[in-house]
Image: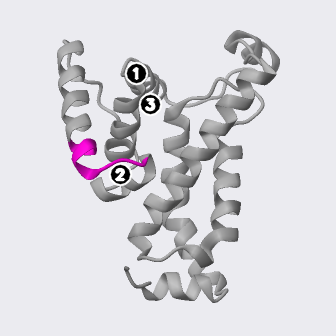
Amino acid sequence: MATDDDLIADAKNGDPDAWRALYRAHAGRLLVWLETRGSTDSIESAEDLASEAWLTAASKLRTFHGTSSDFAGWLFGIARHLAANSRRKSGRRRTSPSEHADLVELGGSVPGPDSVVSGQDWVRATLASLPSRERDVISCLEVVGLDVAATAAALGTSTVSVRVTRHRALKRLRATTPEPLPQLT
C-alpha cells in the first residue's frame, strides 16, 4: 500500500492550506476534462459535476491512500462516475439543451479573440469525432495533462490500455486532419 505524502496527510488532518493546494493543482484540469466529455443534460453543467466531485472527494478523503499525484486519478475517477450517473439521469429525465442561437439572442455574444474561440471550437469538434474511450484518454493526457497512471485511475483501466488507446486515437486524428492544425495561444 502506498503511503500518504505530507500534502495528503495534512489535508486528511483538516489543514485548509493543504486542501487549497490540492484544489489549485487539480480544479482547472478537472473542469476542462469534464467539459471535453460533453453532457446530454442541460440541467447539470461541467461546473456542477466538478463541484460534486470535490464534495465527494472531501467526504471520502479519509479512505484515500497515496500521494498528491495519485489524488488526481482518484478525483478524476470520482468525476467520471458522477458524469456517468448524470448521463443516466438525463436519459430518464429527457431534458434537451437549448439551441445556441437562443442563448445568443437572450444574452448577446461574449466578446473575445476570434482565433481563440475558433481554436477551442476546433478542439471540441475534433475530440467529438473520436470514439468516447479515445476521447477520454486524449482529453486526460493531452488536454488536461494527466500522466498515464492518473489517466488509468481516472478511467478505471490499465496503463497499457491507456497507452494503446492514445496511440489509436492519435493515429485516427492524423488520418482525419489533412490540414495544418490551428495555432492556439
The amino acid type, in three-letter code, at marker 3 is Val
- Disc 3: which residue: 116
Tag 3 or tag 2, which sits nearer the N-term? 3
Magenta part, dominant SS: helix
> Against 181, is 12 above or below?
below
- Asked whether residue 145 appears in the rendered view, the answer is no
- Asked whether residue 67 appears in the rendered view, the answer is yes
> Pointers 2 and 1 in contact (CB under 8 A)?
no
Tag count: 3
Tag shown at residue 106: none
Query: Residue at position x 66%, y 38% from top?
Result: 85
Q: Is residue 137 magenta?
A: no
How crowded is the residue under tag 2: few (<14 C-alpha within 10 Å), some, or many (20+)? many
* Measured Cα–Cα span from mark 2 to mark 3: 30 Å
Could you tell me residue 109's position as x and y percent? 68, 22
Nearer the viewer's eye, disc 2 or disc 3? 2
Q: Quadrant of residue 100?
A: top right
Tag 1 or tag 3, which sits nearer the N-term? 3
Considering the image in quadrants, where does the C terminus appear? top left
Tag 1 or tag 2, which sits nearer the N-term? 1
Instruction: Please provide the residue range marked out in magenta.
Output: 156-163
> Against 61, is 77 above or below?
above
> Pointers 3 and 1 in contact (CB under 8 A)?
no
* Measured Cα–Cα span from mark 2 to mark 1: 26 Å
* Measured Cα–Cα span from mark 3 to mark 1: 10 Å
Considering the image in quadrants, where does the N terminus appear? bottom left
Q: Secondary structure at mark 3?
A: helix
Query: Residue at position x 37%, y 80% from top?
Result: 2
- Disc 2: which residue: 152
Q: Secondary structure at mark 1?
A: helix
The amino acid type, in three-letter code, at marker 2 is Ala
